[in-house]
Amino acid sequence: MANWEDYLEFLNNGPYSIKILISDLVPKERIEFNQRIRVTKINYELYPFQQRILNKIKDDTFIVGLPTGLGKTYIAGAFLLRETINDSKRILFLTPSIPLGVQQTLFARKMLNVNSAYFISGNIPPEKRRILKVWNAGFIITTPQTFYNDFLLEYESEIKLAKSLDNTLEVLKNVLNFKFPFDIVVADECHGYIGDTSGYSILLAAKAHGSKILALSATPQLHSPIRLRELKKVFENIEVISVEDVEIRSFVPKRMINIVNVNAPKELILIYNKLMNIINQYKEKIKEEYGRDHIKKYCKDHSICISFIALKLLRIRIIENGASSVTNYSIWRLRELSEIHDIYKKILNSNHKFSSVSDILEMENYDKAIIFVESVMAAKQLGLMLQEKYGIENVAILVGKGEMDMEEQASTLIHFKERAKILITTSVGEEGLDIPTADLEIWLDPPSNPKKWIQRFGRVLRQTNKDKIAKIYTIITMGTHEKRKLIGVMKKVEKIYRFTHDVKDIKKLKGGQIRLTKYM
């Protein structure tokens, strides 16, 4: 019987462990003097739409907003070739996480032929970073927090004040008593660099000192007025590219969403409805005590509000991720749930969606499959179940929230890239990680907002054989909120981002099983 500890042991000590890999990506000896690098060759060619975007990058600061899976990193690599081929430069590449940092370092070494590209993170203690003089390297990939701690932490109060002023850059130029140590900054997933973040502070400092900045983002996150206002303090040019661009569409496969309708056990629907009654009672109590407007706030100051939020989450998760995913929820101790909990005990070990996932995997022909799950518990349960069926080598599991450290997450991605056919992942895999190409995707639950929709969908938006279809299956529980939620988010995606797709509704047959083969 597979268990979670077995999989972590496999990741940490098996053939896909990243621990040894990371040790090969950091400087081994002290770097005495500032190094400069030239990218003289890249081991790939840009597609025409990527070249078109590259040609627009001419000013000092520029954002490329390109949906996930369409080669932002390849454009960045070609940009570095163009900027350094005749004049060596110092390059800083910011990534939001250790797994992505490792991947970008390998990309620089293998695809840009920069063997002296190094990954610097908190895994190297500050004292060791000082002894090795790691920041003297000419091409550094790092997390924003690591760079911030070594260069900007002592100016924290001055930076915070400067951000609140209209002349932010002018103030920073005067208060920062050092020259920014890199000529070019590439900032991946830059939509997260907003407000009081280390990444945004770095961009402002680089801009104040005249460094050239190229930022990369997925399109949806650039539409927020707040984000745009903040980013425009740094960037003169923001280029947002839609997947509906005619040229881009010719490079992505046809997109098909299959809505798989499933029944839930009658006990689960009973709990679902009773939870709604209790939630409404809590809503009325909050209105009486704190006013009608208070119910709209995400309040965690009052015990009744905390319970209200937890009840709503329980009701959503028990349907979307199945009964077994909420076993350890502390809200079950609430007095009002004692009767419901007695009913729940009859089905707590069941999950009404897992069999459909298994059916899809059996009946589809795919090279790589990604399964998105919101709940960590459901991801682990489903992953271990599929490992029992297909073997631990063939099923990778990616979760966050304290269940996996960043090194284990990176090892999981290597596992999926090198061997596993199936990846089960929570929202940690939606953004900030370079997940290898997949041609099949399954959503155990509907995405809760357009951002999640685009990020999930982007994992199969890769150039493939033109005869192939990028297929997504989303499993919906009949008689619940799930269908309305799915359609509602889909309409927002189509309206805001003009992101379209074909939809097929797979009905549940009288026999009690979904015969997917009928619809293939």
Image: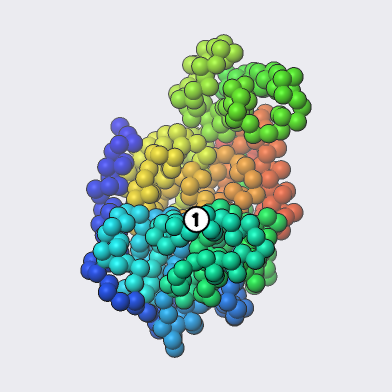
Front residue of 468/37: it is: 37
Residue at 25 percent of width and 57 percent of height: 20
* Residue 165 on image: x %, y %: 65, 60
Say how many tags the image has: 1
Displayed quadrant of residue 68 = bottom right
Crowd tier of the residue under label 1, counting other residues whose Cα lies within 10 Å: few below 14, some 14–19, many 20 or above: some
Residue at 61 percent of width and 36 percent of height: 476
Displayed quadrant of residue 30 = bottom left
* Residue 369 on image: x %, y %: 47, 50
Considering every residue shown, the one lying at the far right of the view is 292
* Residue 203 on image: x %, y %: 53, 65
Front residue of 298/177: it is: 177
* Residue 398 on image: x %, y %: 42, 45
Q: Is mark 1 on a helix, strand or loop?
A: helix
Residue of label 1 = 156
Residue 129 lies left or right of residue 467; in this view the side is left
Front residue of 73/307: it is: 307
Residue 77 visible, this orientation = no
Say which amino acid is labelled 1. Answer: Glu
